[in-house]
Image: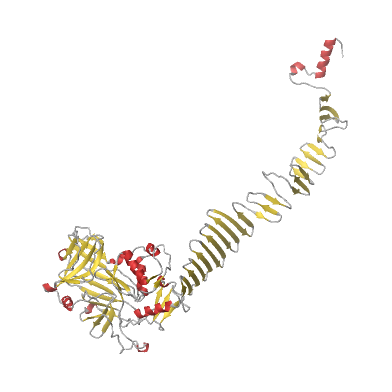
Amino acid sequence: MLNIPEEIKALYRADNLSTATQRHLKLRFYDGKINLPEDVLFHKESLPVDQEPIYVIDNSQIISESLTIEENLCASPDLKFGECNSTQFDIVVADVLLDLTGKEFILTVEVGGYEMAMGVYKVDSFVREQADRRRKKIVAYDRMLKFDVDVAEWYQGLSFPMTLKQFRDSLCAYVGVTQISVILPLDDMQITKTIDPEQLDGRKVLIAICEINGCFGNFDKIGRLTYKFLGFSGLFPSETLYPSDDLFPSEMTNAENLSRYKQSETYYEDFVTRPFNKVQIRQEEGDVGVSYGSGKNCYIIQGNYLVYGKSAEELPSIAATVYEQISRRIYKPSHIVGPALPWVEVGDGIICYTTDDVIETYCLKRTMKGIQGMMDTYESQGSSEREQSFGLGDQIIQLEGKAAVIKKSVEEVSVRVTDLKAETEAKFAITAEQILAEVTRAKQAEASLSIRADQIALSVTNLTNDTNSRFMQTAEQIALKVSKGQVSSQLSVESDKVTISSNRLIVNSTNFQLDGNGNATFSGKVQGAQVVGSSISGGSINIGGGTFWVDSGGNAAINAGQINLGSVNINPNYSDLGAFRVTSQRYGAIYSANGEIELVTSQNDGTGPALILKRGGNVSTRVGYGSIVTGDIWLTNRSDFWGGWTITDEIILLHNRVFGTSY
């Protein structure tokens, strides 16, 4: 609650019928960041701001009663510590020609000669209204939006370990906001690097800081970050007395007593929220966690990475500190409308006396509307008792970035062990559909095993080398695959076939070797095969009952029962090549099946190779070394000259003519 003199409070509580109590608004716009001294919350006449504004809007340009300021300390349906919500400012102005989008301004209200700061805002939109072209609506937000930036680079550049105070001071300096001077309960807690983010939301970092301290983040009226704690709302000596009618909250600290309110617009619940009597810190829903307090209405801090890596000795102390900040805070959910009281802040206690009851609550949401008829609406939501889900186990097993998480639900039972320092994680999960095991080393390697009713799958990946191997088994198939980049080898075993697909196939066994270039060495038989477009050098091949061999010198032989190649027929004692035959009985001879043509290397009479042509079993013509033996030679060319004569006939004719004799 703002420390405002009673004489100023009296001006706001009075009606605005006189000149002294009329409200005068000013919006002073600046080109750069507004720097205000800490003691300028209110001032006689005007605030002492050193900078000169570039533009000022006052009552003469403000449309009557168009002001709305909405502040949210906690926007959740139930009390959720750590929230850091931005305040929204709306107003309608006329005849403003300068584009104010993106400009920062300070709002002040002056009553009875006192000017009071009402917040520092930055224009988010400056839009003309359709109904009246002279009018424009300003929508602006406070400096909480400065945290809506990626702070991963800031986090990665920190020198850990550091205290929580050093951590939050560094964050605020990075985003460019000023904090109030305050000591938070866990400011001395050591912070280590527990995450390795590529992106990190600055506001979520601030939320983590506030949550672990049991407070809320908020900006005050001169643009400084403040940390709001809820004051004690009442004392209960024992749970057996709660919530008896004769024991009602009566010790709310830092509270504003409302003597005036609009009865027609004010309503509240018949119950008061139960106080938190237990604090649990855990990593996620269902995991093991550490608790402080023995009650049943538990407040859970979940997934706050500022406490990752804390030992089992440190965590209970942290939980106890949080417990002190959030326990014994009870209130009656309500909606109260009354005259505007600018010194009341979100987080303050509100005590409203009705005709038959007393409403004790917190200002968790505050909406201020109007100017001369300025009104405040104070709201708080909540339920009588917190509904939480609880996990198993006694403690979080965490030390220097190591964590073990056990999760149990009707859908899944899982265990995850993480070493943030080594960047490794192992997970084992069981669901109704599958059993899954995974091991990961960040940016280096990962492996997984999945077992389902219809499939078993195993995968190992080396992210550094871009290699992967997979095994998959179903009732119909066993499949293997190993890949490097776009190159892969695969093996598929099915009931009717085995398929191997690879760039190269290498086999190394006792009786068969195959290298990557396709060279094969083997023993044994090749049966029922067809060899196409190949050559044989050295070794032997068993064909039927015989053998075909080729030595290293290129000499070859076939020892077989019979080889039938169509027009070529190879038998044990002879071979037929179409109409010609080679036989072992006549070594060195090729002859036709009808005996009329022979090609011999030698004859019985010792003469050399010859081509012999026969007719009717008698030799007709023999062509050998230097001789042709034949009955006669008939020349068919120029039959008109030879006239059917043989060479013998022609020679006899020449002889007779030369020697004049008859032969």
Residue that appears at 35% across and 71% down: 165
Provide residue 227's location: percent of width, then percent of height: 31, 73
- Above or below: residue 649 compared with residue 485: above
Q: Is residue 644 left or right of residue 291?
A: right
User: How is the rendered protein coloured?
Assistant: secondary structure
Q: Nearer the viewer, residue 64 or 145?
A: 145
Q: Is residue 319 left or right of residue 504?
A: left
Provide residue 112's location: percent of width, then percent of height: 14, 73
User: Can residue 389 be seen here?
Assistant: no
Q: Nearer the viewer, residue 650 or 9?
A: 9
- Above or below: residue 589 compared with residue 144: above
Going by the picture, which residue comes out furthest to the top? 660
Specify the quadrant that holds the N terminus.
bottom left
Residue that appears at 73% across and 52% down: 523
Provide residue 308's location: percent of width, then percent of height: 43, 72
User: Can residue 407 be seen here?
Assistant: yes
- Above or below: residue 429 compared with residue 516: below
